[in-house]
Image: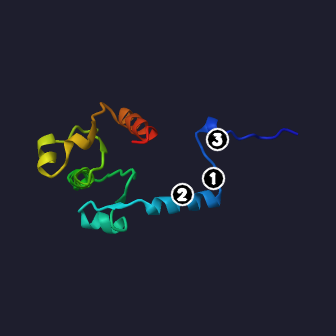
Amino acid sequence: MNRLTFSPALSGLFIQTGSELLEALQQRQQKPLLATHVPELDRLQGGGIRRGTFVGVSGERSSGRLAIGLAALAAATQGGESAAFIDVGNQLDPQGAQAAGMNLKRLLWVRPPSPQMALLSTEMILATGF
C-alpha cells in the first residue's frame, strides 16, 4: 500500500499542535501594544498594534491609507522601534514624514519597481525577522 508523506520543509507549511498554537497566542499577547494615535485603528486592534506585527493597509484612492500607515510608522519610530515601509507607489515624502514625527533613522524604506518586487521585498524582510 502506498502512503502519502508530507514534508513541511518542502512545502513551506508548518503543522502545529493546539497547545503550540495556544502558547504562540499567549506569547503574542505578552508583547507590548504600540498606540498608532489613529483612534479607530487602535480601537480595532484592541489598543494598538503589537510589536512585530505585519500591517497591510488597502483602500480606494484618497481614502487615507497612506496617512494611516504614516501615523503608525511615526508612532513606532517615536517609540524607539525600527519599522519598514514598502512603498510601491513611491508616495513617501521624507520631509513630510519627518514633520509628522517619523524618525527616519529608524525606517527601512523600500521602493520596489513593481507589485511583484514589493511582495518579494516583504517576504525577505519578514524572513530576516526584521
Looking at this rendering, what residue extends furthest in the top direction? 113
According to the picture, the residue beneath numbered tag 2 turns out to be: 24
According to the picture, the residue beneath numbered tag 1 turns out to be: 16
Comes first in the chain, label 3 or label 2: 3
Comes first in the chain, label 1 or label 2: 1
Between the residue at mark 1 and the residue at mark 2, the CA separation in whole angstroms equals: 10 Å
Q: Are marks 1 and 2 in contact (CB under 8 Å)?
A: yes
Q: Residue at x 27, y 53 (%)?
A: 76
Between marks 3 and 2 in the image, the one whose residue lies nearer the viewer: 2
Q: Where is 14 relative to 63, above or below?
A: above
Kind of residue indicated by mark 2: Ala
The circle drawn on residue 8 is 3
Disc 3, SS = helix
Disc 1, SS = loop
Q: Where is 121 relative to 20, above or below?
A: above
Between the residue at mark 3 and the residue at mark 2, the CA separation in whole angstroms equals: 19 Å
Kind of residue indicated by mark 3: Pro
